[in-house]
Image (cartoon, helix red, strand yellow):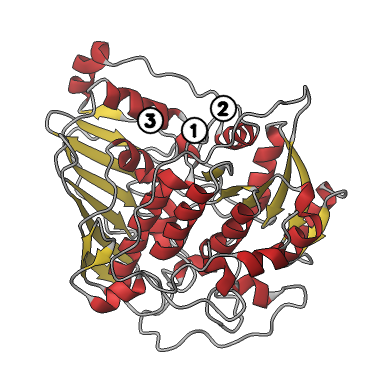
């Protein structure tokens, strides 16, 4: 077994910042493991990092596959009611508050790891897992910063037998297979514009944008390991404004509405239209802009160049309760897909325009929702004309969780591995940077450098990691 101490000692140094010539291009080699001989009752020994709230939900999803044997539970607050509930369900699983100790003490009993933790914490867990040969499933977005996503893609390339998967479940549901089939059949072609929208109320909307400093420190709950919760991020005093999902609204910890919902709305658009990185990202609107937490409403324009014979595409993102995009004639109703998983312990609340996208091509307009929701052609009379021209859409062979475990066994390939999702994660990081600075960013897509703003270019790496966490930036 490769221990954590060996990991610290032998990791090769990655640059502390982006090289002057830009980041090296990342290849597209598959991270799926080679096939192995499987027993009749084969299960994957799974360690779960983050076992409350969303972590508990994905643990249940993995359990339902019948392919997982949960051998370890890890959470920075093992004394909280929601984590104690999960410990009671898995009394034989070993328990840890620090994933590093978990790998040290039982790494040879673990085959795969799940990370259902705040956005900024995905990176160190995934990097250590990959370096130790453990398959890794992280919730979306894959990473908080551009550079961390880059390193995760590079690590996945270095360890090609390690299976990776990002938790945008729609990549294993109907929309994924429909979008691919329609694109391959020429139904979706010559796309020039995409509107994406998430207009639900967010946790940070009531905050005062005249903020001048972070919230005052509060006593750390007795059962919470706050130092480990912070992981690689800079030190912040504890406050409940950062905890239990509230972290998503702060630039230092989360990625706002874009990072939270973008992967569920734009994933198939990005992959099958081969968008890659944008050359321009512009914050068109940042209502309630400040230096600490995300705006109450944002409109962000991403511009992508021609790709082969596909035309340039503008993707415009809208969030904020009243920040609604224009909708085309014949749009029809805006319904919530009942298959969208619970949000923060409850169902998504309907809004005037529910999460989704509008795709404009030369000849057709498509309306879509979020997660696995399928596309429809609008208006209805055009949809009826096209009905006999639509190809048959294949069914999914496995849901997103089974897909990961089957890939760990060598029987499938994951549909949202780091090498596919990583670039989309970087797109979101650029969008967040444009929001944070309330500006326009121009990107050299090949060098992966921002060319019009030296400060923004330095922000691709964000702040240096805290002392003691530098080793996770080594490959």
**Gap in angstroms between the C-alphas marked 1 and 3:** 12 Å
- Regarding mark 3 in the picture, which secondary structure is present there? loop
* Disc sitting over residue 172 in the figure: 1
* Foreground tag (3 vs 2): 2
Is residue 328 or residue 173 the one in the foreground? 173
Q: In this image, 180 relative to 118: left or right?
A: left
Task: State if disc 2 and disc 1 touch (CB < 8 Å).
Answer: yes
**Gap in angstroms between the C-alphas marked 1 and 2:** 7 Å
Say few, some or many: other residues with alpha carbon within 10 Å of mark 3 (under 14 / 14 to 19 / 20 or more): some
Q: Which is nearer the N-term, disc 3 or disc 2?
A: 3
- Regarding mark 1 in the picture, which secondary structure is present there? helix
Q: Which is nearer the N-term, disc 1 or disc 2?
A: 1
Residue furthest to the right: 92
Q: Residue at x 19, y 15 (%)?
A: 385
Is residue 403 or residue 204 the one in the foreground? 403
Residue 17 lies, in percent from the top left, at: 40, 73
Is residue 256 or residue 345 the one in the foreground? 256
Which residue in the structure is indicated by mark 2?
398
Q: Is residue 281 visible?
A: no
Q: In this image, 155 relative to 150: left or right?
A: right
* Disc sitting over residue 374 in the figure: 3
Is residue 61 or residue 417 the one in the foreground? 417
Q: Residue at x 68, y 32 (%)?
A: 65
Residue 204 lies, in percent from the top left, at: 45, 69
């Amino acid at each position: 077994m490769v221990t954590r101490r060996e990991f610290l000692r032998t990791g090769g140094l990655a640059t502390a910042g982006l090289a002057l010539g830009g980041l090296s291009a990342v290849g597209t080699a598959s991270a799926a493991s080679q096939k192995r001989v499987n027993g009749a009752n084969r299960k994957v020994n799974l360690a779960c990092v983050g076992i409350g709230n969303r972590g508990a939900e994905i643990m249940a999803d993995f359990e339902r596959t019948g392919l997982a044997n949960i051998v370890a539970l890890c959470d920075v607050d093992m004394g909280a009611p929601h984590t104690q509930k999960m410990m009671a369900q898995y009394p034989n699983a070993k328990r840890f508050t620090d994933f590093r100790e978990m790998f040290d003490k039982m790494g040879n009993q673990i085959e795969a790891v799940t990370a259902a933790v705040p956005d900024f914490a995905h990176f160190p867990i995934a990097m250590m897992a990959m370096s130790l040969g453990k398959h890794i499933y992280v919730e979306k977005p894959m990473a908080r910063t551009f550079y961390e996503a880059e390193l995760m893609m590079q690590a996945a390339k270095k360890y090609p037998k390690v299976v990776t998967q990002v938790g945008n479940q729609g990549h294993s549901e109907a929309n994924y297979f429909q979008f691919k089939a329609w694109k391959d059949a020429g139904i979706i072609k010559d796309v020039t514009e995409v509107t994406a929208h998430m207009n639900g109320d967010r946790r940070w909307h009531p905050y005062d944008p005249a903020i001048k400093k972070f919230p005052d420190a509060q006593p750390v709950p007795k059962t919470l390991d706050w130092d480990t919760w912070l992981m690689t991020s800079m030190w912040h005093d504890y406050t409940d404004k950062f905890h239990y999902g509230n972290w998503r609204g702060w630039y230092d910890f989360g990625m706002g509405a874009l990072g939270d919902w973008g992967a569920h709305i734009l994933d198939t658009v990005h992959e099958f239209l081969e968008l890659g990185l944008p050359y321009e990202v512009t914050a068109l609107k940042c209502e309630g802009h400040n230096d600490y937490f995300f705006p109450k409403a944002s409109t962000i324009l991403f511009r992508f160049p021609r790709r082969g014979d596909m035309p340039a595409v503008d993707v415009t993102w809208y969030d904020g309760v009243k920040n609604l995009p224009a909708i085309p004639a014949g749009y029809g109703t805006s319904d919530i897909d009942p298959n969208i998983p619970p949000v923060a312990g409850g169902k998504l609340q309907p809004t005037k325009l529910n999460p989704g996208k509008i795709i404009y091509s030369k000849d057709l307009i498509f309306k879509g929702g979020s997660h696995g929701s399928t596309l429809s052609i609008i208006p209805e009379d055009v949809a009826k004309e096209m009905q006999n021209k639509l190809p048959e859409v294949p069914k999914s062979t496995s849901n997103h969780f089974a897909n990961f475990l089957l890939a760990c066994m060598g029987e499938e390939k994951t549909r949202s591995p780091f090498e596919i999702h990583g670039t989309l994660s970087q797109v979101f990081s650029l969008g967040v940077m444009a929001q944070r600075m309330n500006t326009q960013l121009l990107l050299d897509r090949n060098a992966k450098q921002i060319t019009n703003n030296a400060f923004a270019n330095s922000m691709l790496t964000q702040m240096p990691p805290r002392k003691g966490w530098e080793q996770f930036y080594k490959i």
